[in-house]
Amino acid sequence: MDNHEFPAGLTAAEAAARQVAEGYNELAVDQEHSLFNIVLEVVREPMFLLLLGAGAIYALLGDLHEALILLGFVCVIMGVTILQERRTEQALAALRDLSSPRALVIRDGKPLRIAGREVVRDDVLVLSEGDRVAADASILTAHELAANESLLTGESEAVAKRVPSVEADITSSACRVYAGTLLTGGQGLARVTAIGVATELGKIGKSLQSISSESSPLQREIAALTRQLAVIGIGLCVAVTALFVLSRGGWLNGLLAGITLAMGILPQEFPVIMIVFLAFGARRIATQRVLTRRLSAIETLGETTVLCVDKTGTLTQNRMAVAALVVGESWLDVAQMEGGNVVELPEIFHELLEYTVLASEIEPHDPMEQAFQRFAQTWLANTEHLHTDWALAREYELTPQMLAMSHLWRIPEHSHQAVATKGAPEAIADLCHLAEPERIRIAAQAAAMADRGLRVLGIAKAVHSGDDWPAIQHDFDFEFLGLTGLADPLRVEVPAAVEECRQAGIRVVMITGDHPRTASAIAASAGIDNSRILTGAEFQQLDGASLTEQIEHTCVFARVTPQQKLVIVEALKAGGEIVAMTGDGVNDAPALKAAHIGIAMGKRGTDVAREAASLVLLDDDFGAIVKAVSLGRRIYANLRQAMIYTLAVHVPIIGLSILPLLFGLPLVLAPIHIAFLELVIDPACSVVFEAEAADAGLMRRAPRRPGESLLSGGQIALSLAMGSVSTLVVMGLYGAALASGIDAAVARTLAFVALIAANSVLIFSSRSTLPGRVRRGGNRVAYRVLAVTLLALILVTGVPAFAQVFAFVPIGVWYWLGAFALGAGSFGLFEAVKWLGTKMRG
């Protein structure tokens, strides 16, 4: 097989047919909640149990009609809750599907990256270091391929893989790779032999394809608030029950009054709001081609103060092309050559390009090496400088100590081997043991190329005789050949995205392995501050305090190793920054794990990097990171407004449960009324606010302070004040109606209409905490919910059959409109409360 050809894989049609016949590459363990489990959780909810308890009391009192109506509401609430739970589960299931390991397969003779679950038997997998193997497969080709199979065997030592030499080897574990194992080195190809439950991993029933939702500070805060309100609710429930029994007698009716209050104060919406916002927020972020692997990352996005990004493929287009070649004093500008109708590459550059290709992988995935291959195939075709018959015998990896990599090649019918190396120009000059004047000349040439924004590599060659290969690259007698320069254009959207970060108070830091001058040129084009540049070599010259100070004031880091990325992240965190960082390689995983938000590359990143990250960029696009930050801020801001609304609407429910009892008035609310209100509140506080568009100035504000509470003391006070306004308006109407001699049922109906109207306009007022900053339009969900609420209100207060169920009586149109207008008029009072709160804070 030619080194640059892929083996025959399946066609797209064959793969689709096989998937239909054999199913997806999934394990049997179901990570989702089943419908039964969801129903079981719902029936254990306090609100559900309170409704059942109220129904039982009505039955004991002989009011079977009321008991059956409450049972009907139980079914309705169960249906709404189950529907919402299923939607949330579907959102999380979509995220689980996206977060499963990706696989690079050969389809129709071309590499194609697909979800691991879409792999079928007889697919050809392209294996690379850092990948998680998607299915059991038999090795076809292997180049220094090794896998960590501790998941299956418990042994942490990597297992070397090889191509079967005889038929019997096919079943040998050394000639196979297994689903779920991690490739720790090398490259290769393998044909899939088993998927899903038929794999070795499937047989032992372990699943690695899940998203863990760990407890975050926000989740803990909401849980604490929920517990506090629940304790208060239980205490008030007991107090109201006792007060009713002492003042009016009848412990069953007293218990009903207590249950009504408990239903009104129980904060069961809080956890619902939380999971709905995070799950649907993650789906919104996914529309920007950013996968949320950990839901807790969404809340942290709004706190991000530093965004550390790679240059290649994130700020740039990752479309490398050879742009310049330098041999001695001879320079070749590729753009001028190709534009000038040159038919062949000048002879002086042939050997440079030849050894550039020899120093690259045989079947490269790196964009730079792919660019070398394309250029060589174009300009060295039909020459003696392409060596498909040479065999790669030894590879010397790039290390933090030596920024160069070498390949040792066996030459047919020759006793010696050829050695090709490429790397940082200064590293190659060091390997060649060049004199100082020559080093200075090469450094100047590299700097001139870097000033054009080119990525510069030095190339050298050596000849070695015998099979006793040196342990390190320095022991070869290298000859310097020249420099190659590659261009990778900046993404068009990057400057605007960087500027948006700057306005949002987010510092963008570029970290690259490139030459400092290349980094500086790209940073300047992107709008990143390049006034100070720190290199990896300078890292080692600085002590802890000096290094921290330098990192704090530097936005461009060049010639940085993956290990040094971790130092940068830790130093930024120590300085109080909230750090988001991108990475793609195996060695980036520690830094991604250490960052508050690790962001892995979806296309060119390894599975190890993706598993260590909180977010995955499916298109490796910097602009998508900024959009994700903006969405993170929007989600948090809307969650805050939803909590303000939810807290406020519970205040009048509590007030209307307690005040009539204290003033000796007929009770306004019964459990059935609370059930109706819950059907209004739940969608309003979750779906409506979740769909709110972002405030226009959201990305022009400073990041949220770390540890800042979801609701500040002032915001809680504002919420309680707006709820108190609703209580006074509705209670005032109820008391005035009774005082004027209106029947209690009519007064209750008027009060309920006013309460629903007040709650409805409170949605619009709660969309912003600033007076006069009410958002108009843009949220169709809000209008749909309000339309349904209004229709339901008309039915329960205007249609006799429904009104009787709720202990209401149909009232005249003008009475109804008057009560509704009074409740809706609370909007002005809500805005006045917000204005007063702003004045007091100012």
Image (cartoon, rainbow, N blue to C red):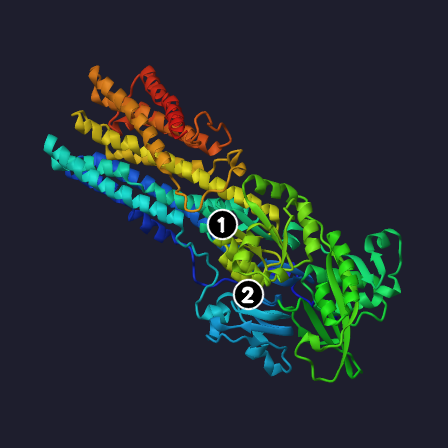
- Side (left or right) of 363 relative to 782: right
Question: What secondary structure is marked by label 2?
Answer: loop
Q: Can residue 569 be seen in this view?
A: no
Q: Are marks 2 and 1 in contact (CB under 8 Å)?
A: no
**Quarter-of-image position of residue 62:** top left
> In the image, is residue 208 above or below residue 67?
below
Between 196 and 114, which is closer to the camera in this rendering? 114
Q: Neighbour class for label 1 at 10 Å: few (<14), some, many (≥20)?
A: many
**Residues under labels 2 and 1: Cα distance?**
30 Å
Of the image marks 2 and 1, the number of the one nearer the N terminus = 2
Q: Which of marks 2 and 1 is in front?
A: 1
Q: Can residue 778 be seen in this view?
A: yes
| Residue shown at the point (84%, 58%) measured from the top left | 331
> In the image, is residue 192 above or below residue 309?
below
Percent position of residue 453, x then y: 73, 52
Question: What secondary structure is marked by label 1?
Answer: loop
Residue topped by disc 2 = 132
**Quarter-of-image position of residue 751:** top left
| Residue shown at the point (80%, 63%) measured from the top left | 377
Looking at the figure, which quarter contains the C terminus? top left
Between 102 and 22, which is closer to the camera in this rendering? 102
Residue topped by disc 1 = 578
Q: Neighbour class for label 2 at 10 Å: few (<14), some, many (≥20)?
A: many
| Residue shown at the point (39%, 21%) measured from the top left | 828
Percent position of residue 163, x then y: 63, 77
Looking at the figure, which quarter contains the N terminus? bottom right
Q: What residue type is labelled 2?
A: Arg
- Side (left or right) of 420 relative to 702: right
| Residue shown at the point (78%, 80%) measured from the top left | 412
Q: Which amino acid does label 1 sit on?
A: Ile
